Image (cartoon, coloured by chain):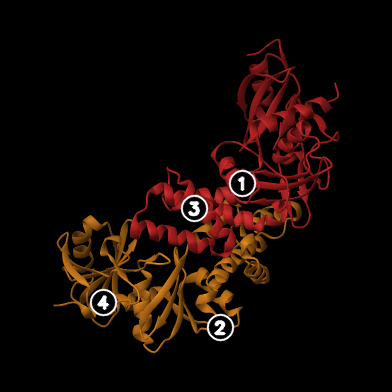
Chain colours: A orange, B red
Amino acid sequence: MAETATDWVAAIAEGADLRLMAMGAGGTVLATGRAAPEALRRSVAELTGALPPVVACGLGQAGLRKVPCRPLDDTLVQRPVHGVQLAAIPGLAQESPAHVMQGPETAIAGFLALNPKFDGVLCLPGETTVWAHISAEEVVSFVSFLTVPLARTTARLLGLDGGWDAAAFSDALSDMMAKPERLAERLASLRAEAQLRGPPEGTARARLWGGFLGAELAAARPYWLGQQVAVIGTGDIAQHYAAAIAAQGLPPAEADGAAMRLHGLGQARLLLKP
Amino acid sequence: MAETATDWVAAIAEGADLRLMAMGAGGTVLATGRAAPEALRRSVAELTGALPPVVACGLGQAGLRKVPCRPLDDTLVQRPVHGVQLAAIPGLAQESPAHVMQGPETAIAGFLALNPKFDGVLCLPGETTVWAHISAEEVVSFVSFLTVPLARTTARLLGLDGGWDAAAFSDALSDMMAKPERLAERLASLRAEAQLRGPPEGTARARLWGGFLGAELAAARPYWLGQQVAVIGTGDIAQHYAAAIAAQGLPPAEADGAAMRLHGLGQARLLLKP
């Protein structure tokens, strides 16, 4: 409970739930919690001792805006939901090729608030990885990939858990960038190699991720080639993406995904009508 | 129970269990059952009223033989296991690129017993799909793919269940064969299209399978290009593979996978010492 100081509540959709952060006026996190959407009022009241406005991202029902556009603008709709003043940041949509993002636009808004002159490509690794072309503070176009859930599921299918071999990762990465159509064959071969020669488990796991990211980088080449790239993400997966992009001779800027998203939610807070 | 007539029992590894078929001397299936490996003796006795020899395929512990070689030969090892005379057909292995098959070699043996003059490429769709180059009754080389479990898992991830649109399948197939590196991007786009335009569910599902099979056919091109191809498989998945190969101007021969495997087990039965 952070009764006196809470100015607003940041909410991030995670599966069916919302992760909540009670925010002080200065941008500090005072308390954290979770809520089912239908219990939002009670959860916010318990968390803050009051009913401050809630700013949310990643909500399906918040609608979609068409690119090219700024990642966040003052069309933000505030409305009472379950007795709470809720402002939900819309996602972004592209008609052709069809791509949708719901959540990453908020991290992009946070990053651009801190780096307004950025011109280049943002890579946002996640359950859906997004590559966005940024110019004049707008998302000009973007493309998304299911690489991370596919790689994770395949690792589980092949029984590959711990360990990491950076050399095996970068070998597999450059192999797959040269012949990306071989992905499903290389994966079957990984399993066969483990059966025939039993390499250390970390080797196979790093090769698997190198293969998946190599296929993605090959497909995203029109995005990153010759561009300034920044990776906005958190944890191991973001590190793998940064290493893969650096291996193309493009050492990327790196920004923490959770921090950028929170900063983006803070930008949306500034747009709220009192 | 098929007490008097059972000559032998065919056993097929399925996960941790064995599927059993009591076989008459003429090759007819007299009764079927299942067994955990450690309960094999009791299950065979219950199924047949006797303890006839058991011929099994797909067992990990049966070892591997290196290609090029015949899919089945008289090195078949008979030994008592849990009180049953068991002959387990070894799988096949290739050193480089590393690939392993355990199960498909038996269907290949069955097919070649019926088509001894076959010279070309066999495609065996399954949990691991195998493409094998056959010449002079030998498996010369082979390659394997994890396409089917990847496609199935992705369909689940995207919530795509029923329905099928043959035109969408063949469009996605030829798209992906031209640009196979785009697989993970096309999959993310499928989901976005469903969100933006809501096409009938069968369209998205057919596009997903077309995409995965297109990537596989692109990678397997050195195998099938200019070759006589036969598809050995069962059910919808085998039909999709056959349609994909036919779309390359190579209408394949088709043989039932379960029947070919059983015929291969029967060939192994003929090799048993009394």
- Split into 4 quadrants, where in the image is the N terminus of chain B? top right
Considering the numbered disc 1 on the image, is that residue within a helix, a strand or a loop? helix
Residue A13 picture location, percent across and down? 32, 63
* Distance from Cα at disc 1 to Cα at disc 3: 19 Å
Rendered position, B190 above or below A114: above
Task: State whether discs 1 and 3 lie on one chain.
Answer: yes
Q: Nearer the viewer, mark 2 or mark 1?
A: 1
* Distance from Cα at disc 2 to Cα at disc 1: 45 Å
Residue picked out by circle 3 = B208
Rendered position, B258 above or below A18: above
Amino acid marked by disc 3: Leu
**Quadrant housing residue A25:** bottom left
Residue A103 picture location, percent across and down? 35, 68
Residue at figure coordinates x 63%, y 30% from the top left: B36
Amino acid marked by disc 1: Ala
**Quadrant housing residue B125:** top right
* Chain of the residue where label 3 is placed in the rendered structure: B
Considering the numbered disc 2 on the image, is that residue within a helix, a strand or a loop? loop
The answer to which of marks 4 and 2 sits earlier in the sequence is: 2
Asked if disc 1 and disc 4 are in contact, CB closer than 8 Å, the reply is no
Considering the numbered disc 3 on the image, is that residue within a helix, a strand or a loop? helix
Q: Nearer the viewer, mark 2 or mark 3?
A: 3
- Split into 4 quadrants, where in the image is the C terminus of chain B? top right
Front residue of B205/A113: it is B205
Residue picked out by circle 2 = A251
Residue at figure coordinates x 68%, y 11% from the top left: B3
Q: Nearer the viewer, mark 1 or mark 3?
A: 1
